[in-house]
Amino acid sequence: MQQYRDRAVRDIHINTCRIFEDLNLDGMAYAKGAGLNTTKKCLEGTRKEIIQEIINWINDPDVHASRMLWLHGQAGRGKSAIAHTIALWIKDVGGLGSCFCFARDRQAERREEKILTTIARDLADRDPTFRRALANAVSKDHSLKTTPDVVQQWRKLILGPLSKVNGMIIGNVVVVIDALDESGPDTSREYILSLLASPEAANLPSNFRILLTSRPLPDIKDVLSTVAHVKVISLEDIPAALAERDIRLYVSTELCRLPEIGAVEVQNIARKSDGLFEWARLACRFIKPNRPGRTVMERYNEIMFPSSRGGGTLLDVMYRTILEDTVPQDELTLFRFRSVMHQIMSTFEPLQLAALNEMRKHFPSEEDHFDMTIILEFMAPLLGGIADRHSVVRPLHASFYDFLTNQPRSGEYFLGASSMHNLAFASLHTLCSDLKFNICGLDSSYCSNNEVTNLQEKIHHNISLNLSYSCQFWAYHLQRAAFDSMLVELVKTLVGSEKIIFWFEALSLLNGLGHGISALASTITWLQGQIGFEDTIKLLQDGVKFLQNFGGVISHSTPHLYISALPFTPSNTVLSGMLMPKFSCLIGVSTGRLKEWPVAQLTLQGHTDSVNSVLFSSDGKKIVSGADDNTVRIWDAERGVQVGSPFEGHGDVVTSVGFSPDDKRIVSGSHDETVRVWDIERGVQIGVPLEGHGKAVTSVAFSSDGERIVSGSHDKTIRVWDAERGVQIGDPLKGHTGWVNSVAFSFDNRRIVSGSHDKTTVRIWDVHGGIQIGNCLEGHGDAVTSVEFSSDSKKIVSGSFDKTLRVWDAERGVMIGNPLEGHTNGVTSVKFSSNGRMIISASRDKTVRFWDVERVALSSDGRRIVSGSFDKTVRIWDAEQGVQLGSPLEGHGNMVASVAFSSDGKRIVSASHDKTLRVWDAHGYEDGQSRWVANNTEVRFFNDGWIRGPKGKLLLWIPPTFWRPFYSMWNKIVIPRGSCIEVDLSRMVHGKHWHQCFKSLV
């Protein structure tokens, strides 16, 4: 115990450390209510042997001791009680630990995505050394605080900090994970199991222990039963005499106040339990005289000698006995019982009794309009949330679900297949009746949602739990319901009126806009194939586009759903035609308003971490992306939605992705040192990972015939793979002395070009001979980051951190012309145009540039140069110092073909392939620079699209479509392509008057 006394000394320093060190872990994802519950611990004196065995395992000083113990048993065996007892013990002795519990009725919370962030936070709260290591990890990557990627959580938030503090933590570290089987479907715990069975888990510090409890489900058993570092204990193997002894002690304690129950009765109950603590608990509750109608001994006899025969297990008999006592078997009562239980079991998250009753009022049949209390008030032995009306209603044990849905076991209480019709109808009816404009009475449009005072209190008072649930889950019920005319009419009422935008408003306030697009998309699917609903489908499709284009601004500030998003809805859309006549005092887009939705403005949302690589398919219909969340995703480039599920398999960040020439396969490279090939149509990995690289893979590409794959790596090698057989071809291509950053095939598939971190070299390789061709292409002064062949395979372009691009003769191995200079920071990507006449480059200077002969002009005094470029900008330069003056003059929608100064040097004219001429104030950059520095209270357009006023007030948000042609304050004249975009603000209401935009009809 000395180690825990030492820990007490350590604890004295924790608060001091927190005061003097910046160890901010605020915002880290944390599963509320998933921790230790002392009311669930074992009764003192029970389970002594198994508890002592676990404690001995925790204290085992052998460095080869198993790091993990899997305690399994069937439902009702008392696994959770043991788990909470151990968690409480480690807390009482001053040890370092965490307790994380899954629950079947909390699956909607996706606790599996928060398991390791929660555990890491618990450990950090108890140990200052671990806290410092954890804070250091998240300070370098803030996305780790909220990433749902358990692989990243494991490596960055658990293994990483542990490696930093190994040997510094006093005593044992004990992590308890209870009821993993209740996480959800097996896919919800797949990655958790793989991590627990991994070599990293086997090599955890010798004082680290993980106690895991679950039922022996096949997926869990298959992973854990054969792993060497996992100690396995089955509660089924505990001698029956010990289990009976413990249950006897429990029963005698629970029923000690009942004179009718003596030693014989206690013994009989203990034996009847057959080792199931849950059975014993329910039996004791049933026997206690807390219901009228029967004596204690009559209740005892019903438990011991059930009149109903058959039905499976002893626990089923317990359920049947309690149900028979509480639910009379007349037709009306059984109908209401089934109706109530169907509702409780079919909701996607548990609700309080009041919310369930409110929802029931909207059921289509009058027969269902009854107070659920007449059924539920007698079911406290089986359901929680009955006595305590502030708690949600849910079964006290998961096996009750199974019992009610198995007819041979439950008999007349059998529920049958769950119908979602009632819940779909109730949810839609709730939306149609309860949604309204400015539902929470927001005072001003100047504030973001985060700045609204007492917003959560406003939501609590104005959005009922039933309405909140309906907003988030109506479509989930609808898609599981059969097509029905009543449901269709409700859908048409919701999406065919202003109710749809009121629904968007509620989702914004509930932070639930993520439900919006999927709800509308699933409703489209539900309606497809039915005749006569074309207009409704068009409205739903417009709703999807609306959220894709404006979801960000709506989430940021709810009032701007109306005053910023709605006015910019394209005029030819059905949604605009329906909604705009019902609103007034909005901005007017008098000319230049979009008529259709801009495909270019789709926001592809789904990745949970930084996206590193994107590419169009050759037909332009799909996009592939790879990201730091270890996934590869396919997107519909026209609809802006994800196609299928993410491709998962990489164990680290995905750095590079590419399509095969026929667009049927994807290749990806990762920091996990592997290359993987994926089947797009089937959504699965093809074969095994291509392994061979010794460090992170940085770049991958298919050959133009799709037969080969090339990869470059931090291990300084290039490797060529047979794309069909999944094997390496020949030996690695070696020669680079630094990381290989970029690789590409020539279009004739005869050569490979590579760029490296060895600062100076681009190298060309013979694909078939596996050797370098000629000398290195030298000239860059820093790492070469990107390389590519031209379409005729005669030229190579390279980009470098030395801020230049260079074009090379691929045949002679010499540079063509001078370096292309202009970027002010490292070049990160280069590409040839399809005709090879133009090059596009991206840089850390935050610009993308097109390279060709620029159009330039000189001011009359010779002091300034103006240039127009393929990058659509006009720039002014100091002719003597060679530096750019001010910011680029932006607004053209295509390349600038010609520029000129006026004779007095005060104006500039530019002509563009966007079919416009623009006149600029040639000295505007001077006024602009001083103005914004001297007076930060002016109205200003920011690069995030917001027009903000004094003190950051949100005045208006401009969609990205209009950012580039948004006219500068320096434009004196615009000669446009037909007409310009003009916004009329004269009638716009904002601030405290924003709510006047809606014409409410009484």
Image (cartoon, rainbow, N blue to C red):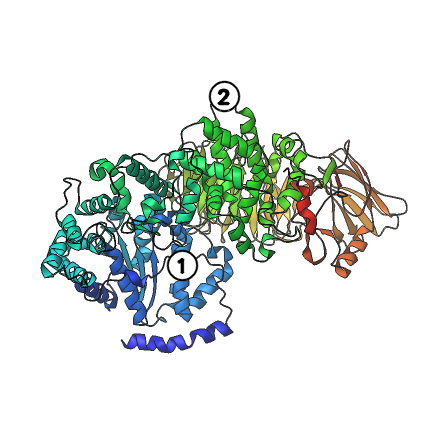
| One can see residue 751 in this view | no
Quadrant of residue 482 in the image? top left
Left or right: 343 in relation to 623 = left
Report crowding for label 2: few under 14, some 14 to 19, many 20 or more residues within 10 A (C-alpha): few
| One can see residue 513 in this view | yes
Helix, strand or loop status at disc 2: loop
Tell me which residue sits at (11%, 57%) in the image.
265
Tell me which residue sits at (76%, 59%) in the image.
935
For disc 1, the marked residue is 118
| Numbered mark located on residue 47 in the image | none
Three-letter code for the amino acid on which mark 2 is drawn: Ile
Report crowding for label 1: few under 14, some 14 to 19, many 20 or more residues within 10 A (C-alpha): many
Q: Is residue 494 above or below residue 116?
A: above
Helix, strand or loop status at disc 1: helix
Left or right: 615 in relation to 562 = left
Nearer the viewer's eye, disc 1 or disc 2? 2
Three-letter code for the amino acid on which mark 1 is drawn: Thr
Label 1, label 2: how far apart the Cα atoms are = 50 Å
Q: Position of residue 300 (x, y in %)?
A: 15, 52
Q: Which of 257 and 513 lies nearest the eye of the viewer? A: 257
Kindly give the residue lying farthest to the left in the view shown.
264
Position of the N terminus, as image quadrant, is bottom left
| Numbered mark located on residue 531 in the image | 2
Q: Is residue 778 above or below residue 496?
A: below
Q: Are marks 1 and 2 in contact (CB under 8 Å)?
A: no
Q: Position of residue 726 (x, y in %)?
A: 37, 37
Sequence order check, earlier mark of 1 and 2: 1
